[in-house]
Amino acid sequence: MNAPAIRISKPVREQVSKEEWEARVDLAACYRLMHEFGMVEMVANHISARVPGTTDEFLINPYGMLYEEMTASSMVRIDLEGNILFNATEHGINEAGYVIHSAIHGARHDVDCVIHTHTLAGMAVSAMKCGLLPIAQTSMRWAKGVSYHAYEGIAIHLEERERLVKDLGENDALILKNHGLLTCGASIAECFNNMYRLERACQLQVMTLSCNTEIELPPQEILNDTWKLFQPGVRRRFGLLEWPALLRKLDRVDPSYRD
């Protein structure tokens, strides 16, 4: 698949560092995987990745392309002030995407990737007063460590960034009330895994609550122990083992994300 609207005099790969190019490939892969697993809303939403070796620059999608069209060359490099530093496309960036992602990249230097979605299951759970329930093992990964942020309207106001960061805290998952989901990760692979698992937990909750029957939850001690086993480094850093297999999946489907 050819990415539309790429306007370059020489390949982007020759204009950026080796480390940035590798981040661009992984970020484009993440967009394609979000499409593959049905976590998209046309050209809306955004995934960002910190530019390697920097503390104030990140890559984000051009606003106007579908996730299935994303390539390494199409990613836009911006700084925390919103200045576009490199853009090989004819598109700009999503203003809300800038506000949300700049807030987290600016405050959380342990985070290299941020994903935000508007999936049906995620939006449904974001409106539930009960929050995310530890219904099954997949959900127990989030028995603790999920934050909540009250809806303030479309995220285009810079002053909301402080409250976003405060509500997220040190967690890697944030449910934006009446809005959607957000995950962070120390790498693109880990962030994607966090979002995939959070989305599955939301899907499970919507399905379970639709059964209109009493729900039985495990004892709190079991929930706590299970949650601990899902923490980074306790058994393994979840997402890293899966990532090469996911890239092989993409390469079989359409390897053009690497362009």
Image (spheres, rainbow, N blue to C red):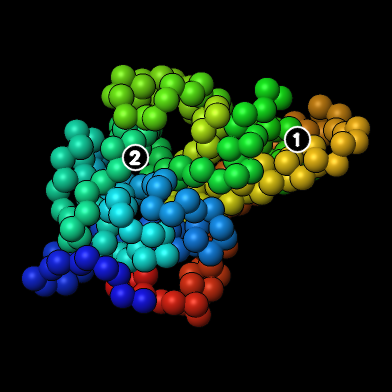
- Quick one: 57 or 208, which is closer to the camera? 208
Q: Is residue 57 above or below residue 236?
A: above
Query: Residue 177, percent across and down?
Result: 55, 27
Q: Quadrant of residue 74?
A: bottom left
- Residue shown at the point (22%, 49%) measured from the top left: 92
Q: Quadrant of residue 163?
A: top left
- Numbered mark located on residue 134 in the image: 1
Q: Is residue 76 above or below residue 141?
A: below
Going from N to C along the chain, the mark reached first, 2 or 1, is 2
Residue type, numbered disc 1: Pro
The local secondary structure at tag 1 comes to loop
State the separation of the CA atoms marked 2 and 1.
Answer: 30 Å
Q: Quadrant of the N terminus?
A: bottom left
Query: Residue 142, percent across and down?
Result: 66, 36
Query: Residue 122, percent across and down?
Result: 60, 40
Q: Is residue 104 left or right of residue 39?
A: left
- Quick one: 111 or 125, which is closer to the camera? 125
Can you identify the residue that label 2 sits on? 97
- Residue shown at the point (49%, 23%) measured from the top left: 151
Residue type, numbered disc 2: Gly
Q: How many numbered callouts?
A: 2
Question: Is residue 169 among what the camera can see?
Answer: no
- Quick one: 240 or 168, which is closer to the camera? 168
Q: Nearer the viewer, mark 2 or mark 1?
A: 2
